[in-house]
Amino acid sequence: MGRYVVRRLLQMIPVFIGATLLIFLMVNVMGDPIAGLCGDRQCDPATAAQLKKEFGLDKPVWQQYLTYMGNVFTGDFGTAFNGQEVTELMSTAFPVTIRLTIVAIFFEIVIGITLGVVTGLRRGRPVDTTVLMFTLVVISVPTFVTGLLLQLLLGVEWGWIKPSVSTEATFSELIVPGLVLASVSLAYVTRLTRTSIAENRRSDYVRTAVAKGLPRRRVISRHLLRNSLIPVVTFIGTDIGALMGGAIVTERIFNIHGVGYQLYQGILRQNTQTVVGFVTVLVLVFLVANLIVDLLYAVLDPRIRYA
């Protein structure tokens, strides 16, 4: 296990460098950050040259990237064009988005897996058909439509929730935004669990466990569910980074000042330091989440061994 973890960590290094290099190049060619910094009025050449020198934009792109990566390993993600440290923005944005992601993952695990198990064990029955139709509707409706409808009904019309989230963004305030963020992924988890349960239910090891007279609950929890959750865990693990990076729409709807909000502001204002810094951390989240998922395989299926 230890050798496998070390090997995976070494494999993450070129992936991390390649991903950060790609986003760095994409951000630097998407527009002129100095023009965005000056606003509607065009900067005079002297001011533009001074700003480029101040933020290191007068150097070649490859040199800017090497300087940025050298600073990243010391914990310095640069300074935004408004003079605020990117790490300071991260310290306020990431805790909010992490709480939002936790709520979303909770809904995916509890509701998605529960509905998947119920429909997988009752395949072809009315409850299965109803849940399949419901998940299809959820997948078909865009997230911003679901968010706006829930905000209008629960917040404006019925007054059950606040239409917008406060700056503290407590867990209780993030229940509805978390449900909106998790809605599409929840539907996929339900369908994926249902398919996996239905297929493994006909496996030899399940029939053997039933023939031995084991209780139905034990057969489902100890044999059927553990093996069926492997593809589900894979999806949820990769979905963690996607939820954190893809929360732009949800955070905009509910006025949540998290990672999505900061990324939106950075792209809108062409603030390259902010965008590259936040995406760099999200790349690390993706890599760590995938490593944890691979290690969970051995927990779910004892037959899996890592050399």
Image (cartoon, grey):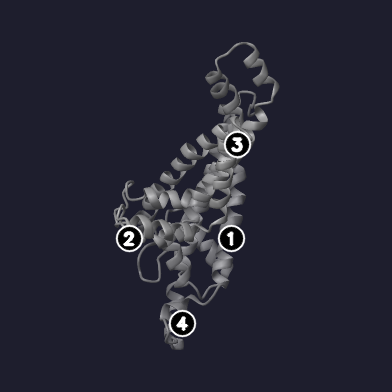
Q: Residues within 10 Å of mark 2 (few under 14, many from 20)?
A: some
Q: Which residue is mark 2?
A: 156
**Residue contact at pointers 2 and 4, CB within 8 angstroms:** no
Helix, strand or loop at label 1? It is helix
* Residue that lies at the very extreme toward the top in this rendered image: 212
Mark 4 lies on residue: 49
- In front: 5, or 219? 219
Crowd class of label 3 (few under 14; some 14 to 19; many from 20; radius 10 Å): many
Picture residue at 32% right of the left edge, 55% below the top: 158
Q: Is residue 55 visible?
A: yes
Q: Are marks 4 and 1 in contact (CB under 8 Å)?
A: no
Q: Amino acid at mark 2?
A: Val
Separation of residues labelled 2 and 1 (CA atoms): 44 Å
On the image, numbered disc 3 is attached to which residue?
194
In the picture of the structure, the residue carrying the numbered disc 1 is: 21
C-alpha separation, residue under disc 3 versus residue under disc 2: 36 Å
Residue at screen point 64% across, 35% down: 124
Q: Which one is in front in this view, the residue at disc 2 or the one at disc 1?
A: 2
